[in-house]
Amino acid sequence: MTWDPGSWRSKTALHQPVWPDSSDLERVEKELSLLPPLVFAGEARDLKARLGRVANGEAFLLQAGDCAESFDGFRADAIRDRLKVILQMAVVLTYSSGVPAVKVGRIAGQFAKPRSKPTETVDGTELPSFLGHMVNDLPFSPGDRKPDPDRLLRAYHQSASTLNLLRAFTKGGFADLHQVQTWNQEFVAESAQGQRYADLATEISRALRFMEACGVSSNHPEIHEADFFTSHEALLLPYEEALTRRDSLTGEWYDCSAHMVWIGERTRQLDGAHIEFFRGINNPIGCKVGPTATAEDVIGLCEALNPDREPGRLTLIIRMGADNVETGLPPILEAVKAEGHPVVWASDPMHGNTFTSETGHKTRHFDDVLREVQGFFAAHRAAGTWAGGVHVELTGEDVTECLGGTTPVETADLGKRYETMCDPRLNGRQGLDLAFQVSELLRRP
């Protein structure tokens, strides 16, 4: 079948904003198409190779970051603190389980969110729903909720700045394993999880000193630098098309807005525009799979998105909810295994476990998050397949958005620092707690 970056336009594209002026959108698309790529095809190929190792059971995917990035909260320290938590979690997973962690952030592009309803009504006034800072703004007023194509340009430029900072942190010494103790943030360090991490960091430092004392060089790039990749839900197809470029070396098309992009649960229709766009780009890609998905649905996705059965090409991100995963996942695992599709299996234990608390806050309970991860691992052990990763929403800040954890957030605490623009995120303590729990699951036979 023929394909080009705009062939999705002949299909139905769900969850797209109603832009007030199509000529404004066309102007922004043209400007975006002339801007430099945010990432390069070679970097995306590198990530695909690493995910191929995950698909083969030789590595583990840690995909983590903000629910929805904000134009207002764009600060170097916030990006640094989010990176700290992800680096901490990766160290815990790698050191405790003995398999390398592939680090992919929900960052530098995660600005758009699908919503269950296109409009919102408050006190009799109906306005467009908040769709992320890439589209409109959170305050409930006609001006703020009006979709503005120029926000696509602002998202591009903020993503470029974020990527620049991430590359500086991960390649400029901040991610050096000799600095592993310095990643422990103050509010995390005071917790039981922080103390456990500090003990592990001491072990790593001793191991590095032992290697050096024995004359074994610790100058390997993996010791001094971190390979960190970016990802987001590629929801707004005009933006993704504008940043899709043909690689000069291979002649293949890559979506250069991120190293990895994924399709959401709401937009994975086999005859839809998102599947059409994704089937033609050569990035590693993901697809969310919720509780309504059947084995037939998932096989269809695999055939459409990875017909050549390339390891590392397709990650299936399971988001079924703690009560559904152990019964809903096994038939899908068996079907995909029988068809020989080499997918990466990752657990998103966040989106299927959301509820509204008695205080009116949308939240998740850490126990449910952990229970879904445990069910995900149990299903894979029974099927003889590799539970290859976790996909979580988190922040490096001391927020109170998700209940529970070893240092628990109680219902009465939710209002203290509930700062998310959309879905509740794990804080640094909870993220580290989850990493220790997952590392123990990885060690089980």
Image (cartoon, helix red, strand yellow):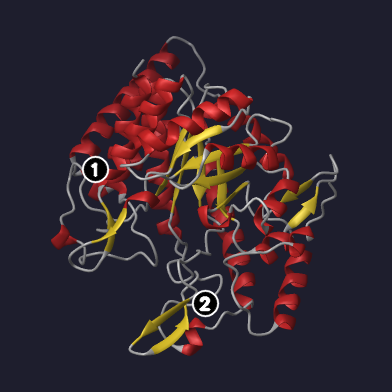
Residue 7: name its quadrant. Answer: bottom right
Above or below 304: residue 115: below
Above or below 336: residue 37: below
Residue designated by label 1? 367
C-alpha separation, residue under disc 1 versus residue under disc 2: 34 Å
Q: Which of 166 and 123 is in front in this view?
A: 123
Disc 2 crowd rating (10 Å Cα; few below 14, some 14-19, many 20+) is: many
Residue designated by label 2? 136
Report x, y in % for residue 128: 49, 80
Residue at 46% across, 19% down: 384
First along the sequence among labels 1 and 2: 2
Report the side of 386 relative to 187 (left or right): right
Residue at 21% across, 35% down: 195
In the rendered structure, which amino acid carries the disc numbered 2? Asn
| Residue 101 visible in the shown view | no
Secondary structure under the numbered disc 2 in the rendered image? loop
Above or below 46: residue 130: below
- Which of the image's four quarters has the C terminus? top left
Report the side of 408 relative to 353 (left or right): left
Report x, y in % for residue 360: 23, 69
